[in-house]
Structure formats: structure tokens, C-alpha cells
Amino acid sequence: MPSGLILLEGGPLTVQTALALCAGVTAFSLMAINLFLATRPVLIEAALGGLDRVYLTHKWTGIAALAAAVLHQSLDMTFEGDIVTVDLAKLAVDAAETAFPLLVALVLVSWIKRLPPRVTAPLASIPLLSRWSNRDLLPYALWRWSHRALGILFLVFCYHQFFVIVPFKANALVSAYLNVMAALGVVSFLYTQFGAPLRPRRYEVTRVEHLPAATVIEAKPLGRPLKPRPGAFAVISVARAGLREPHPFTISGTLPDGGLQFSIRALGDYTTRLRDTVAVGDRMTIEGGYGRFDHRRGGAQQIWLAGGIGITPFLSFVDALEPSDQRQIHLVYCVTSADQVVGLDRLEAAAARVPGFTFEIHASRTAGRFDAARLIEAAPFPLREASFHFCGPAPMRDGMIKGLRDAGQSPKSLHFEEFEFR
């Protein structure tokens, strides 16, 4: 649509100029849409099938915006246009040219989570650099600040859009469209910075348990509690130094008093600090529950596969199972060793309470690697007739799906969530 308006209302333009203008309008529009997606809109989450899909769309929209901006910047434009003042137009061009390399750098940092192994592997042998051989390119806190900076750059591009020379009148439809996009982006950015902090609910940590494979945290509401669906996740922030940055975690259980439980494995800097420092009495904010990972959307026969700490949504699933449930469900819980099992008592209680629910634990250290052939053998029904719910490492998921497809046992439906939010 915006490109069509450029062609209709821009007058006689060369092909190169028209392409440059269309690329600029597209880049500006995609940046505005991306800022809107960053507000975590509930209706968009429902339409796309979960917040993980919203973030995936957010990522690729940002990459597409960068590609369009590069095209716009690289093409020369020649036309006669109306300007407010020469000085304002020149400043608008200069501001965009200054902001452009910053946009490239920030989008690339957001896109490239880690450097490839062939780059980082040599660092492992250097004492001072070895700690970075398996780290994210940017710590999470700095990555969040880079996203805030993208919002500030959008304000610069709004100025550029308002005052740069254009081959159409100020009252043209394309001008109105660009003004709407500018308003959408600016309002969305201001909301994420000043309005979104009002959404989380206040909680207090009531229990902390350190298990070999996870830190179990329970918190009670200090006001109106959240009422998440089984399998949902939330964005939490703990009021303690080093733990204030919001991070998403699956809710592993709900408590009778409206409290929530999280089972978190120490996999990075933040989760390690959380394990070492969080304590009973700490205040925290929780926003959620997000996601569309829900066993109730599955069929009459379901296979659940949990890899490591991927058991957390399944714990909330089994808590929600009723004795009258007619579905046949089998859970395979893969761990490295038996001491890493989390929530065994809840799995056993569900198996005793619900006739159709069964589970098994696969410890790879003693039983070997769990693959598609073993999953086919473990399932008490043909997998091609079942719903497959997975939570665990992405490589395990991809390998399992490929193995099932190669064996002619592709599931009837596949359910999982992307947990790469950056």
C-alpha cells in the first residue's frame, strides 16, 4: 500500500528514485510496526499463536526494516519537491545519515545472538578470553538497552520523515500514512518505556529451594494475582541488585493462595545470580501469562517430551489433569542423570490420579541418548495419530522431528514454543 501511494502521488519519477522512496517508506513502516510488537499486544499474540511467535515476527521485521533502509540509503534520488526550509531539510538528511550506521549496528547486534563456533572456539584456549567462548555477543542487559536505543533512532527518523524533501504534497495520502506510522511508533515506544511498567503484578518470594537441576521459587501475590493457563510463561523481575532486568520463565505451578512457582535452571549469568542471591522476602514483579503452549489444544492421544528443565510447563499440565480426563497421555522426561529430576512427586501423583496419564524418565548418562526410535518405542500408541508436545533444547526438537519424519511417524500435530527471545 505505501509503495503504491508513492507511485500514484509522487509524480513523474525515475525508476531509481521511486525504488528509493518505496524502500524508505517501507523501512519506516516496519520500524513503527516493530515498536508496536514490542508492547506485547494481546490481540496480536493470540493471532500469531503465542508471544514467542510475536518475538520471532519482531526479529524478522527488524531485519527486513534494515534491508529496506540499506536500499534506501544506497540509491540516489532526483526530483523536485516542496520543503519547509532549506536548513530543516538539510538537517533532516544529516540526522538520518548519522543515525543510519547506528541502526545497522543495533539491528545486527539484535540479530546475531552469538558468534559462530569457528570464531569463538579459538578463544577457549586463551585464559583471559575463554569465558567469552560460549557467551552471547551482548549481555542481556546491554541487549535491552540496544533495543531502547532503536526507539530513540526511530524518533530521529520521524524528524527526517517530517522535514526531508519529498515529491508529494503535505496533504497527500502517503503523508497521512507516514504520520500514522510515526504516531504508532512513537506511542508504542513511549508505552514500553513508561506505560508497560504498570502492567506487572507485585509478588513476594515465600520459598526458595535449590535442587541439582533447578532453583524452585514460589511467590505470593501482594495484590490481585495473575491467573495463568497451564503451560504459560511470565516475565519476572526481582527487586535485588543484578536481578531487576525482566526475564521470561515458564510458570511451573500455581498455588492455592494465588501464588506462582518457577523452576529455573542456572544456564547463564542472570539465572546463576538468581540461584545464588534470591531469598525469601524478596519483592518481585510478574507479568503474564503469555504463550499458547496448551495440552488442551491437543487430541485424544498425546505424547509429551521434556528435555531437562523443559519439564516446567508439563508440571503445570499434570497439576491440571482431572481423574475424569479421557485422553491418553504419555510423558517422556529426559535428563542427564536421575538426580536432575524436578517434580517427581507431582508426576507420580498425576499418574495415580488420572487413569490415562503415564510417564517415564530417561537418564541419558546410564540409558544412552534418547532419539526418535526410542520415542516411537516408548509411545503406547502410533505417533502419527497423536499430538506431540515438546519443550526442551531446539537441537533436540529438530532432531526428533526429523527422525520421526524419516521413520514415517510424523505426529498428527506438533506443539512447541520458541524460547529465543533475542
Image: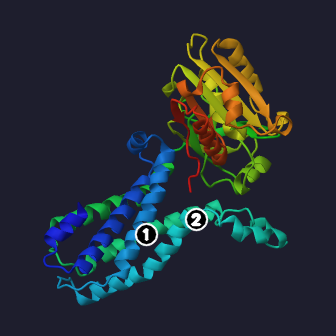
- Residue 82 relative to residue 187: left or right: left
Would you name the residue on which mark 2 appears?
A: 112
Q: Is residue 186 visible?
A: no
Residue carrying label 1: 66
Residue type beneath disc 2 = Ile
Q: Nearer the viewer, residue 277 or 157?
A: 157
Q: Residue at x 63, y 42 (%)?
A: 397
Q: CA–CA distance between discs 1 and 2? A: 14 Å
Disc on res. 192: none
**What is the x, y in percent for residue 177?**
23, 62
The answer to whether residue 336 shows anywhere in this view is yes
Query: Which image quarter holds the C terminus?
Result: bottom right
Secondary structure under the numbered disc 1 in the rendered image: helix
Q: Position of residue 408 (x, y in %)?
A: 57, 33
In this rendered view, identify the residue nearer to me: 188 or 56: 56
* Quarter containing the N terminus: bottom left
User: In the image, what residue occupies the spot 74% across and 67% down?
Assistant: 132
> What is the total number of numbered labels drawn onto the structure image?
2
Helix, strand or loop at mark 2: loop
Query: Which image quadrant for residue 125?
Result: bottom right
**Callout 1 touching callout 2 (CB < 8 Å):** no
Q: Residue type at mark 1?
A: Leu
Lower sequence index among marks 1 and 2? 1
As drawn, is 253 to the left or to the right of 29? right
Which of the 4 quarters of the picture holds residue 351? top right
Q: Nearer the viewer, residue 235 or 392?
A: 392
Which residue is found at the position 45% from the left and 40% from the top? 49
Q: Is residue 263 above or below residue 349?
A: below
Q: Is residue 136 above or below residue 324?
A: below
Mark 1 neighbour class, 10 Å CA radius: few under 14, some 14 to 19, many 20 or more: many
| Picture coordinates of residue 12, whole percent (x, y) | 13, 79
| Horizontal and vertical percent position of residue 332 | 70, 29
